[in-house]
Image (cartoon, rainbow, N blue to C red):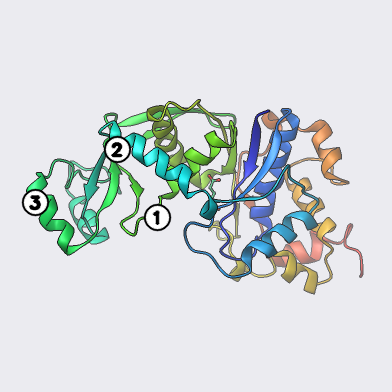
Amino acid sequence: MTAGRFAPSPTGELHVGNLRTAILAWLFAHSTGRQFLLRVEDLDRVRAGAEETQLAELAAVGLSWDGEVTRQSQRRLHYDDAVSRLRRDGLLFECFCTRRDVAEAASAPHVLPGHYPGTCRDVPEAERMAARRVRPAALRLRTDVGQFEVHDVLHGRYTGAVDDFVVVRNDGVPAYNLAVVVDDAEQAIDQVVRGDDLLTSAPRQAYLGSLLGLPPVEYAHVPLALNPERRRLAKRDGAVTLEALAAEGWEASAVSAVILRSLGLPDSSLEAALSVFDPSRLPREPWIVDPSHLSSTDAAPVRPNR
Ligand code: GLU
């Protein structure tokens, strides 16, 4: 059976925007007969206790998932295997550039902003040996396309740039773009629902998947939650986590109801929302969250304890 998933990075509490994405991932998966998996993306920054908190928050808004929670930190063998295959196929090269090197070289007129300018692509072995003594190498993908097309349920056909991106960081840790592709395929995940800030990463990931011979996935990049200044919602914007809202008298079920209403769905339960869920009717605009408004007006009809 195939699956959809939610894949949080355990860096802190989830805010209402993250919870909304999780609820959407659950709705997309279950409305298409898929399982719903939860994967903790803990290769990078991790805050102690954040995983437990996030799992409790997801459960509190009514979500449950199939099988055990998986953790990327326990899946290194899968990433190592993919790296060996890419290396065997001559698809990796060592890169000794610092962030600053890349930023400076990438400001040249012929390089797309933010893209790797190819500095280390064809460095002779003698030079690479010398460079290895100075700093460890990251491994980058030797790409032979400038762009790649993906299919997204909400965005249609989307073509985005693909550069020689990093697949193993110079501290030996698999990069996000590699881990996510390997995990999704290995876990039989063929539906990726996540915030639309990651839409531009999808072509890189899909291209890497094609090099590894993996089946393509269906994407749904959903609108983010923004603050009233239209910047990405953050904890500093006010009471936007379950914990902060609980301190103002909110039950988690009331938060869940507000999220479902923001999606134009019935707010009595996730199951009620699932029974009428239709991706084509989802709002395409960001969800503007004004914490002061959320705690006074929106909450009033559903807020218990007050
Ligand atoms: N772990 C990523 C995040 O929390 C999401 C990755 C993904 O869904 O592909 O932003």
For disc 3, the neighbor class at 10 Å (few under 14, some 14 to 19, many from 20) is few
Cβ of disc 2 within 8 Å of ligand 1? no
For disc 1, the neighbor class at 10 Å (few under 14, some 14 to 19, many from 20) is some
Indicate the position of residue 287 as horizontal and vertical percent values.
64, 50
Quadrant in which residue 290 is drawn: bottom right
Query: Which is nearer the eye, 5 or 224?
Result: 5
Q: Is residue 29 left or right of residue 72?
A: right
Q: Which residue is mark 3?
A: 127
Query: What is the distance, in whole Å, between disc 1 and disc 2 at their CAs?
Result: 16 Å
Give the amino acid at mark 2. Answer: Arg
Per the image, label 1 sits on a secondary structure element best described as loop
Give the amino acid at mark 3. Answer: Glu
Indicate the position of residue 151 as horizontal and vertical percent values.
51, 27
Q: Earlier in the sequence, mark 1 or mark 2?
A: 2
Residue 173 shows which numbered tag?
1
Q: Is residue 284 left or right of residue 88?
A: right
Query: What is the distance, in whole Å, between disc 1 and disc 3 at their CAs?
Result: 24 Å
Give the amino acid at mark 1. Answer: Val
Q: Are marks 1 and 2 in contact (CB under 8 Å)?
A: no
Quadrant, the N terminus: top right
Residue 87 shows which numbered tag?
2
Query: What is the distance, in whole Å, between disc 2 and disc 3 at their CAs?
Result: 19 Å
Quick one: which residue is furthest to the bottom in this view? 247
Q: Earlier in the sequence, mark 1 or mark 3?
A: 3
